[in-house]
Image (spheres, grey):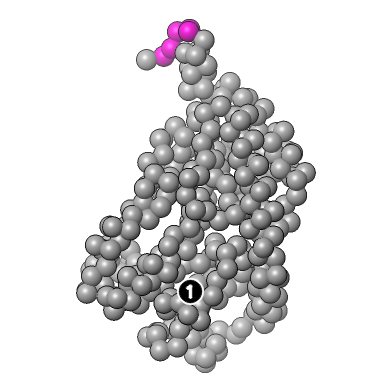
Amino acid sequence: MCRLLHDELDYRLTEVGVDSQGRLDMDEFRDAVDDDTVLVSVMWANNETGVVFPIEQCAAIAKARGAIFHTDAVQAVGKLPVALADSRIDMLSLSGHKLHAPKGVGALYVRRGTPFVPFVHGGHQESSRRAGTEAVPNLIALGRAAELAHQRIDDENTRVRRLRDRLEKGLLATCPDARVNGGEADRLPNTCNVSFEFVEGEAILLLLDQEGICASSGSACTTGSLEPSHVLRAMGVPFTAAHGSIRFSLSVYTTDDDIDRTLAAMPGIIARLREISPFGRDKTKSAAGKRTIP
């Protein structure tokens, strides 16, 4: 939407970069927000790497310049404590399927007094903020899912985080030329984004699926694209690694057995794919002192 406003209505759009760990460049952010800035939007946590951004700090900078502050908290809600009563956040969006509610239901928090124009017109539903008949069962499910997520937030940040860390440690130990993207940054407890050099991420997913293991490549927004993730490109991840990146998303329903199965399957999958990859074979030959392809 921001790019649409920029391209079609000539609004000024400023995009702020990140460092090699996916952390927001706060000096660049401060310079980007000036007295002419109308709206600042920052994701609370990245959907591919799980890297968490300093939302309250960003909100304070935006409000000091008189701008409205919005955060995309789709990844964060249910994983991190979210309290808005004393926050500087004006708007917050979330999606139900990220906390085990049905797909297709979400919510937009709007602080009282924040200017708001409906995107969908035609009715007075939802206090005239969005026209259309409400999907009441889905809304009830979202409310209940939020209650359960609140009850399980400690488990999410202890047991689930330990499972994630064990998965990453095992993958790095058994799969050569692997790297955890954003591994040095503050991250969500459930997200693991790993790059395996010289293989294709889609091929990894295909073989994992045969083992009954679900993972993803990039984000759902770019499903079907053969281009490497724009998130990883912004972080400076090498092309040979970005193409071999996959994301494991854990939850309170993930078990130790799930991690064991994944760690048992991954070394063989990566070795098999590198054996049939010209880049992987070339590296193997080089390591053995054999002829390499220029």
**Which residue extends farthest right?**
257
Q: Position of residue 92 (x, y in %)?
A: 48, 74
Whether residue 99 can be seen here: yes
Task: State whether the magenta stretch is mostly helix, strand or loop.
Answer: loop
Q: Secondary structure at mark 1?
A: strand
Query: Given the current orientation, which residue lies at the most extreme top position?
Result: 290
Residue in the image at 62% along x and 44% along y: 165
| Residue nearer the viewer, 241 or 4 | 241
Frontmost residue, 54 versus 98? 54
Q: Which residue has dot 1 on it? A: 92
Q: Residue at x 51, y 36 (%)?
A: 179
Residue 212 vs 138, above or below: the answer is: above
**Going by the image, does 266 lie left or right of 89?**
right
Question: Neighbour class for label 1 at 10 Å: few (<14), some, many (≥20)?
Answer: many
Residue beneath the point at 61% across and 25% down:
271
From the image, which quarter does the N terminus lie in? bottom left
Q: Which residues are magenta?
A: 289-293
Q: Closest to the observer: 201 or 67?
A: 67
Q: Amino acid at mark 1?
A: Leu
Q: Position of residue 261 (x, y in %)?
A: 74, 39
Q: Report the quarter where the C terminus lies.
A: top left
Q: Is residue 65 left or right of residue 234?
A: left
Q: Quadrant of residue 58?
A: bottom left
Can residue 250 be seen at all in this image of the molecule? no
27 lies left or right of 103: left
At horizontal 48% and vertical 8% (from top left) the residue drawn is: 289
Residue 166 drawn at (x, y percent):
65, 42
Query: How many marks overall?
Result: 1
Is residue 17 rendered magenta in the image?
no
In percent of width and height, residue 95 lies at 57, 68
